[in-house]
Structures are given as structure tokens and as C-alpha cells.
Amino acid sequence: MDRYITWIIVGSVFAALAVLFGAFGAHGLKSKVSAEDLVIFETGVRYQMYHALGLILLGLLAMNPNLNISTLPFIFFVIGIIIFSGTLYLIPLTGLRWLGAITPIGGTALIVGWISLIYNLIKA
């Protein structure tokens, strides 16, 4: 399977999970956590969806034979989604506020993913 198809599949899985987590947050958590915690959870969902769509875009761009897109943006997006959104899901669910100190690592990975995509596009 071509890597760009894998990127599109992974992006689609993350998008489907974002919808699932969003529904869980809206219906399952709304009455169980504070309004502040619900906002935290929803931020994780929102950023997961943005970057799931970014992964799909990445796969579509990689289909162009004139663009030699490296795997770095893919790797950083996946790591970023897992760490950034993952910690934002866990904070309201577990009450472990210290996880907020890890969240910026995921955010940095997402930023590096976008910068590496920009670099790949300029390089092409």
C-alpha cells in the first residue's frame, strides 16, 4: 500500500474517533464534569479533527508525483494528536491536572508537523 493511502486512512480513523469523542463529550460527559473540563475535552476533539483533516490533506498532496513529501509531517501530526488531544481527554476524565504540563509537547509536535509540511512544499 502506498504511504499516502496509509496517511489518508490514518487521518480518516482519527477523524472518525474525533466524531466519536465529540459525541461522548456532548452526551456522556456534559452532566458529569465541570463546564471548564468540558471545554478542555472539546478542545482536544477540535484539534484532533483539524489534524485528522491535515493528515488527509497530506496524503492527497503526496499523490502528486511532483511533490516529494517526507514522512516527517505525518509522524509529527500523529504524535501531536496522541499527546495533545490525548492529554486533553485524560484531564477531565481522570482529574490528573499535571497532564496539562505534557500537553504543550503535543502542541509543539503539531506545529513542527505544519512547519515540515511547509518546508516540503517550498522544497518542491
Image (cartoon, rainbow, N blue to C red):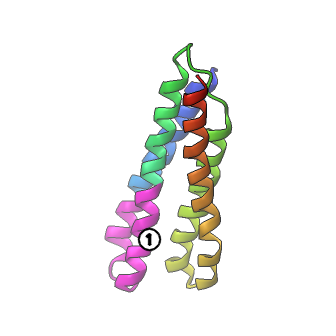
**Residue situated in front as seen by the camera: 98 or 109:** 109
Against 20, residue 123 (above or below) is above
Magenta extent: 21-47
Q: Can you give x and y, in whole percent of width and height, for residue 63 in the image?
A: 53, 19
Q: Residue at x 50, y 47 (%)?
A: 14
Q: Quadrant of residue 99?
A: bottom right
Residue 2 in view here: yes
Against 41, residue 114 (above or below) is above
Q: Can you give x and y, in whole percent of width and height, for residue 91 in the image?
A: 54, 78
Which residue appears farthest toward the top when viewing the image?
65
Q: Residue at x 33, y 82 (%)?
A: 31
Q: Residue at x 64, y 77 (%)?
A: 101
| Quadrant location of the N terminus in the rendered image | top right
Q: Which residue is mark 1?
A: 41
As shown in the figure, which amino acid type bears the numbered disc 1? Phe
Main structural element of the magenta stretch: helix, strand or loop?
A: helix
**Residue situated in front as seen by the camera: 63 or 31:** 63
Against 18, residue 27 (above or below) is below
Q: Quadrant of residue 107?
A: bottom right
Secondary element at tag 1: helix
Q: Can you give x and y, in whole percent of width and height, for residue 5 in the image?
A: 56, 25
